[in-house]
Amino acid sequence: MKKLALAVVAAAAVGLFAGNAMAQSAKFAATYDTDVEMVSATVDGTSGAAADGPHMTAEVDLASMHVPQSKEVLIGVSGQVNLVTFTQAKGKNGSGTSTAIADGGVMLTVKYAPQGTEDICANGTTAKPGPVVFASRRQELSVTVDLDVVGNIVDVCDAQCIADSLAIEGSVTVALGLDTTAAHHFNFVADDLDSDWYDVVACYDLTALAQVSGLDLDSGTAAMAKAAIGPRMLTLQQVRATTDGIVDETGTN
């Protein structure tokens, strides 16, 4: 875990700016996006063992800010995340364990680069502390059915007859679905910057995975996962590190 000691530089004017509408003297800027970005994956016993949804990166661009020599930028990222997971496991008597797994999440990385750099998510410098799990959920559901009848056989019967009389046919199906939405926030730092104009981008990596396993699977065992990022905002504030600067848990700069 990183520790940070910062003293905020006083700004003559503080305001919200989007696009390129930020004044050059600003020490604070913000931008937001309300478009919903989503990935999903669905699988059942008839369609395959796993479905891996496409990884999607949603970018939110922050207006350029001029940073003096050896200054830091404190970057705050907020966003509303919706995670939906559904698992259904169907167990047949004597057929072992059936399992359904649904996994969805959002990874967040903040990157920055001199103004004009293309594809900052791929080519920019990663702000500290690096990638973080913005939101995540892994849901696993398993069912095992193994039933026998215990009793006295009064009729004259051979071994096969007894085995047939003790056998139970049928299945048990259990399902669980969760749908949660919450707002999340995390702070990042771009430290010891050279004097220049910088663009900052929040890179949200959305992932979804659905998986089923077991013997004798059919459509009764299924999984679905969805991860979505909705309204989100980046804030950018010019700051100056204290004497101790940015240190890790060992106290090393």
Image (spheres, rainbow, N blue to C red):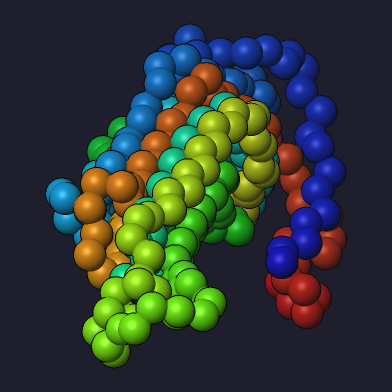
Q: Residue at x 56, y 45 (%)?
A: 135
Q: Position of residue 25 (x, y in %)?
A: 62, 19
Above or below, comparing residue 36 to residue 145 in the picture: above
Front position in the image: 228 or 154: 154
Quarter occupied by the C terminus:
bottom right
Task: Determine the residue positioned at 32% across, 37% down.
Answer: 40
Image spot of residue 175 (x, y percent):
47, 44
Residue 190 is left or right of residue 206, and the answer is right
Q: Would residue 184 be found to the left or right of residue 168 on screen?
A: right
Q: Is residue 146 above or below residue 189?
A: below
- Of residue 124 and residue 48, the one placed in the foreground of this image is 48
Which of these two is toward me, 1 or 15? 1
Q: Residue furthest bottom?
A: 159
Q: Looking at the picture, how far across and down is residue 47, in whole percent?
A: 15, 49
Q: Residue at x 59, y 32 (%)?
A: 180
Quarter the N terminus occupies: bottom right
